[in-house]
């Protein structure tokens, strides 16, 4: 007699179904984890780009702070009275009591392509005289013209704002913290920057730091 053949019983079918569901859940979990990792990586990449953009602009202005033409500051005559105090303190840092608002104010040589208009123009022959006039002025003959503006970076709310030359815009957003320190040492002066960015949806944060050397020795405050 031929042995009697049996099919799958209910127990075997339930076991196979359970194993299939476990494998399917594991595959789904792996897919979700991979997607989450991809989203986090994308957020970190965006934050890195934002930090690089902010630091590039800040470094450009900080390096030009205190650049007031080719003569010593003592040789400058201020036809624009409001410029005298600004030129005397070209770098100012202020912090709110809770640390949630930081302002960095820079009086800097106008960088070409920055947009807007300069606050002052320093006219000089680079030999014997230098004068600071309001707004934009043109040089002529042996007179050189150096446009100068005040650039203000302000961390307020969750954005880093930039204003200057009649312009006011958000430089980057999703900022969790912004710290600025003016350091004076035997090897010169520098500005230390610390920036914390976050993604409100994914809940990730990253800290970024940069030290920028000041090219021009600032007046004593």
Image (cartoon, rainbow, N blue to C red):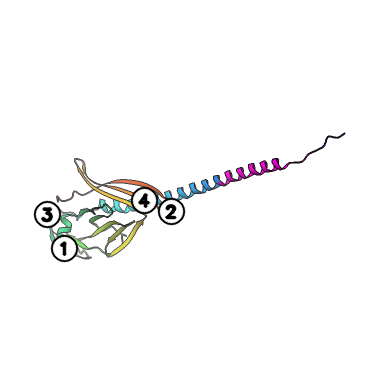
Q: Give the range drawn in magenta.
A: 6-28
- The tag on residue 138 is none
Distance from disc 4 to disc 1, alpha carbons, whole Å, reads 36 Å
Q: Is residue 142 visible?
A: no
- The tag on residue 197 is 4
Q: Which of marks 3 and 2 is nearer the N terminus?
A: 3
Closest to the camera, between mark 2 and mark 1, is 2
Closest to the camera, between mark 4 and mark 1, is 4
Residue position marked by numbered label 2 in the rendering: 201
Closest to the camera, between mark 1 and mark 3, is 1
What's the residue at 57%, 47% (across, down)? 28
User: SS of the residue at dot 3?
Assistant: helix
Distance from disc 2 to disc 4, alpha carbons, whole Å, reads 13 Å
What's the residue at 17%, 61% (across, down)? 83
- Residue 198 screen position, x and y as percent: 38, 51
User: SS of the residue at dot 1?
Assistant: helix
Q: For residue 124, what is the image quadrant?
A: bottom left
Q: Which of marks 1 and 3 is nearer the N terminus?
A: 3
Residue position marked by numbered label 1 in the rendering: 82
Q: Answer above or below: position of 71 versus 168.
A: above
For label 1, the crowd category at 10 Å Cα-Cα, with few meaning under 14, some 14 to 19 and many 20 or more, is: some
For label 3, the crowd category at 10 Å Cα-Cα, with few meaning under 14, some 14 to 19 and many 20 or more, is: few
Indicate yes or no whether the magenta region holds residue 98.
Answer: no
- Residue 188 screen position, x and y as percent: 20, 43
Residue position marked by numbered label 3 in the rendering: 74
Q: Is residue 182 left or right of residue 11?
A: left
Q: Are marks 2 and 4 in contact (CB under 8 Å)?
A: no
């Amino acid at each position: 007699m031929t042995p009697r053949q049996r099919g799958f019983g209910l127990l075997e079918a339930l076991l196979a179904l359970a194993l299939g569901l476990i494998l399917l859940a594991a595959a789904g979990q792996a897919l979700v984890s991979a997607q989450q990792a991809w989203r986090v990586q994308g957020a970190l990449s965006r934050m890195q780009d934002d930090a690089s953009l902010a630091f590039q602009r800040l470094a450009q202005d900080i390096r030009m702070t205190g650049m007031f033409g080719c003569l010593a500051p003592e040789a400058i005559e201020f036809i624009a009275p409001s410029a005298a105090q600004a030129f005397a303190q070209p770098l100012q840092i202020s912090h709110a009591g809770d640390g949630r608002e930081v302002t960095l104010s820079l009086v800097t040589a106008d960088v070409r392509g920055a947009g807007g208009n300069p606050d002052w123009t320093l006219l000089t022959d680079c030999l014997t005289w230098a004068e600071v006039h309001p707004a934009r002025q043109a040089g002529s003959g042996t007179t050189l013209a150096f446009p100068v503006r005040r650039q203000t970076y302000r961390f307020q709310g969750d954005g880093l704002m930039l204003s200057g030359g009649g312009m006011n815009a958000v430089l980057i957003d999703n900022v969790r913290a912004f710290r600025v320190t003016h350091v004076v040492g035997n090897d010169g002066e520098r500005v230390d920057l610390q920036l914390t960015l976050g993604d409100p949806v994914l809940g990730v944060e990253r800290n970024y730091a940069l030290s920028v050397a000041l090219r021009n020795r600032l007046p004593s405050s």
